[in-house]
Amino acid sequence: MISAEATTWLTTLLFVSTYLGLAIGEVPGLRIDRAGIALVGAAAMLAAGLIDLPTAARAVEYQTIVLLFGMMVVVAYLNLSGFFGLATERIAEHFHAPLTLLAMTIVLSGVLSAFLVNDVVCVALTPLVVRLCQRLGRPPSPYLIGLATASNVGSVATITGNPQNIIIGSLSGISYMRFCARLAPIALVGLAITFVIVACLYRKQLTSASASPSFVPRRIHVHRPLLAKSVLVTLITVGLFFAGYPIALVALSAAGVMMLSRLRPERIYRAVDWPLLVMFTGLFVVVHTFEANVVRTWGIEDWPWLRRTPVPMISGLALVFSNIVSNVPAVLLFKPLIETLPQQESAWLALSMSSTLAGNLTLVGSVANLIVVESARRSGAEIGFLEYLKVGVPLTLLTTLLGIAWLQWLAPA
């Protein structure tokens, strides 16, 4: 049995190694991704005897995994039914002028991301937006950047908006309605700011695009019975979220109802982001071990600078850490810290807001951004790092400051 001091140092070493790998996104000389890094980190903690298997199992927030899986399944059926293609086509048919199309792209991305997990919304919408820009002879960059940034901003509004919100909803116990009431105003104003910034920075391209060919509607292949079922189940699911039913159970039940169809299940399984679920599982174990063996020796409850102004301090720290190790791992780091604060709800909401909006800072700041960039690249559209940065920096700073002001001084208790 190793000593307490050795336990602390070994836990710290494995934790730092895991998070360094997550920050880089790979291990030199190996073909391993972030999910594999988190899994290896958890396995190393177990193999070293720093945590036992039953404790590791209890450390995994199963409700988070279940909720995320359920929503992925529901969105997969919406996509296969033709919902996203039909919505994009109808919007383009009525709002195909350059600025109005940009506005509607931002609204569609933001609103859908608020309820259906922004990562999977970006998977569905990006190829549709690229093809639409090609048909209209429009530069795709403003629309794709608007899509990516709006998906992050819109997802601030609810617990089911993004993976980190799902974790925070599970850890904090804040109700779906309460969460939405406190953060939805930030998302709404943030979407307006997103439009203004993208429209201003791309005004020349959007103005020159006004002479592009008129829009010719195309027939979208829609599986109407599945579309009706998917939309109905989604609406009922969101309604039950707001009604206060257990959101993980509701999401899993919705997925079960959708699986009762004639579609081959393999098509749905391919749409589930299994690596993300694996990364979550590994990170829960790694962070819990670090918390139990190291963080509890720090005396966080005696840090007065944090207790006096938790919203600005947590927001600032989350903005930094989210762009170092990604927002999901960063959120888990704050759990032991927030649990020592007297105003935990405001702290959790500040963490949710800032870690999500931090994803807009750089091209690699969020999974949603990477999904849009990679999907666009496969379709022949490139978005440069510096090009994105021109939008990301002012947007992140303005929306984060807005969020801090709202939660600190303006939001109703």
Image (cartoon, rainbow, N blue to C red):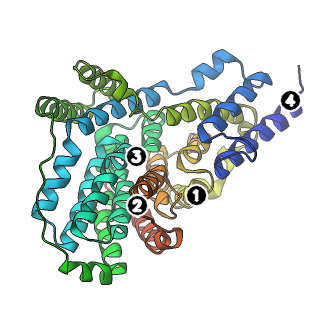
Kindly give the residue lying farthest to the top in the view shown: 54
What amino acid type should be assigned to the residue bearing mark 1? Answer: Asn
In the rendered image, residue 288, in percent from the top left (x then y), is placed at 65, 32
What numbered label is drawn on residue 371? none
Q: Which mark is drawn over residue 380? A: 2
Give the CA distance from mark 3 to mark 4.
41 Å
- Indicate which label's residue lies in the foreground, 4 or 1: 1
Q: Relative to the observer, which residue lies in front, 103 or 30?
A: 30
Could you tell me the amino acid type at mark 2? Gly
Residue occupied by mark 1: 323
Tell me the residue that label 3 is attached to: 119
| Circle nearer the N terminus (4, 1) | 4
Residue identified by numbered label 4: 4
Q: CA distance from mark 1 to mark 2?
A: 27 Å
Residue 383 % position (x, y): 45, 66
The 10 Å Cα crowd at callout 2, few under 14, some 14 to 19, many 20 or more, is: few
Kind of residue indicated by mark 4: Ala
Q: Position of residue 50 (x, y in %)?
A: 77, 26
Q: Amino acid at mark 3?
A: Asp
Where is 58 relative to 409, above or below? above
Q: Residues within 10 Å of mark 1 (few under 14, many from 20)?
A: many
Q: Residue at x 32, y 38 (%)?
A: 176
Q: Is 238 left or right of 127, judged from the image as shown? A: left
Depicted 30 relative to depicted 391: above or below: above
Q: Left or right of 74: which side holds 17? A: right
Q: Secondary structure at mark 1?
A: helix
